[in-house]
Amino acid sequence: MAEGGLTTDLRSSPHLKQATTVEDIMRNVVYALLPVCAWAIYAFGLSVLLLLVTTTLVCIASEALFCRLANRPSTIGDWSIVITGLLLALTLPPGFPLWMAAVAAFVAVGLGKALFGGLGYNVMNPALVGRAFVQAAFPVAITTWTPPFLPGRFSELIPSTLTLPFTKPEPVVDWIEQNRIDAFTGATPLALQKFEQITTPVADLLTGTIAGSAGETSALIILLGGIYLAARKMLDWRIPVGVLLGAVLVSLPMWLLDAGRYPDPLFVLLSGGLMLGAVFMASDMVGSPVTPSGVWIYALFIGALTVIIRLFGGLTEGVMYAILLGNVISPLISRVTQPRIFGEEGKR
Amino acid sequence: MAELPNRQEQVSLDTFLRGLWQENPVFVMLLGMCPVLAVTNSAINALAMGLASTFVLVASNSLISLLRNFIPKQVRIATYIIIIATFVTMVDYAIQAISLELYNALGAFIQLIVVNCMILGRAEAYASKQRLWPTIINGLGIGAGFTFALLCLGVVREILGAGELFGFALFGDSFQPWVVMILPPGGFFVLGAWLLIFAWFRQRREQAQARVEEQQQETVYER
């Protein structure tokens, strides 16, 4: 601390210091995400690998660009931008055109993060901002699903992946039929349940032998990543638990009322992006409230809203908008749930 | 606004040009944002809205300028609104007669020119103090600035959102439209981007000016 001589280090509390830094936490989140990425590549093939590489590289390049434009030291080294890139790719359909993914990544960093002042100041989860943008901009491409475990997935790309920039992606239906023996409707379990009342078996949902966004299909692997992070205290366990609880609290009464029309709570938990959102996105430290009671309100709100959008909205999946709305109201929740200071007089 | 002209302004080229750049109603004064965001989803809508607003602005401000010594201070806002509403009604019927399609596309925003702060602001800040001739020239300048700004947004949004310009397809069938750009959020994105560009230009110009002044100061000191 000083140059020679005896010095006393005088500091105010807290005196117990942890060696955990932003970089440590972010790096561990990346470790937890790697199995999810690996499974996504295994299930959907080379296209997902390219998707992951594209979004991550574009995110890093955009972060470097915006740091330079703002005359700030570069923040690439803190790994948070890698998480944004990986998460963004995991929420996109496997055959999503790469140029659209690059647009999403640029918007995620620019609009979701840099505009608010970088890491720690972003109101909403950057990856979801990027996804929300492409959802609104390219509604067809983002709902074009391909089935997992196609025989040719490691030797050839999904034809829509390498679409030229600014052009429409090719339809993938023909390509799927060539590759697969039985007919595939191109629907995710959520769409099947919502429009045709076909419930996908729970075992398929757990292992991920279903169509869907690249990283959301295997609930089991996502849960393992979450447990790793929670055990290392790098994730507030209240958030995933609260989100899932919120989803159950809304879907259970609906299911009991009309089991033919509404899905059972277990299906709600395991299908779609709820697990990925609950474990890796809602738990983003920047976008969630700081008080323990606030965290519960925030998490239950997201879970409940997700199910409400799914059951009563026009969209099949509501996790993205639920988390973005939760992020937006979380400063308000933090403010309302401030604990009382000892010795404070009267009612607040 | 840079400065309010309190004395009678002599008509010069600057009377007109100020509205285009220095006092641009959209990019500098941020007035009349409602039509700017709402009707700029295509270039033709933007142009129609800009021209309609320009007509109302010039006509109403001329009348206000002529009547400026007769309007009692206490009821001036109400008087301005009545005068503006008169011209808006004219424009409303005119557009309805010329092109019903355009009229339906612009919706309620033609009638809402009545409460456009840009027009009311010019009436209060300029027309009520100036003679007829400068008012007309200044109104034309501000109107041209408003139309220019609307076109800036409309062109970008139509090209990205539909692959067209003034209704003509630019890129052929394989172009992938960015649907979000012709939806309301696109208006905010494009407006924000233009504001960023114009603010950047202004900042650079101010910095260059400051540097010139600094150099002049230094030469004075050296003497």
Image (tube, coloured by chain):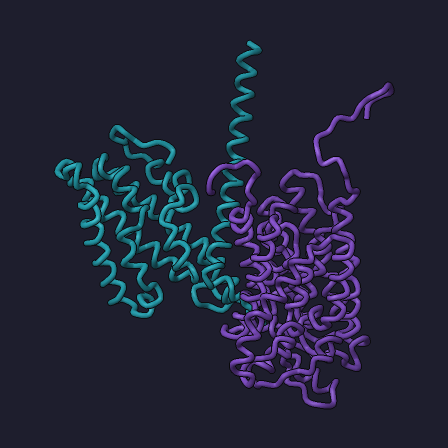
Where's residue A135, x and y in %?
57, 66
Q: Give the quadrant of residue A275.
A: bottom right
Q: Quadrant of residue B71?
A: top left
Q: What residue is rendered at 26% in x and 66% in y? A: B96
The foreground one among A93 and B105 is: A93
Q: In the image as oriented, which residue stretches furthest toward the top?
A: B223
Q: Chain B is drawn in which colour?
A: cyan
In the rendered image, which quarter contains the N terminus of chain B?
top left
Q: Which chain is purple?
A: A
Q: Residue at x 64, y 79 (%)?
A: A189
- Asked whether, in this view, residue B99 is left or right of residue A277, the answer is left
The C terminus of chain B lies in quadrant: top right
Residue at 32% across, 32% down: B4
- Name the foreground residue: A344 vs B106: A344
Position of residue A225 relative to residue A4, above or below, is below
Q: Residue furthest right?
A: A4
* Percent position of residue B210, x then y: 52, 26
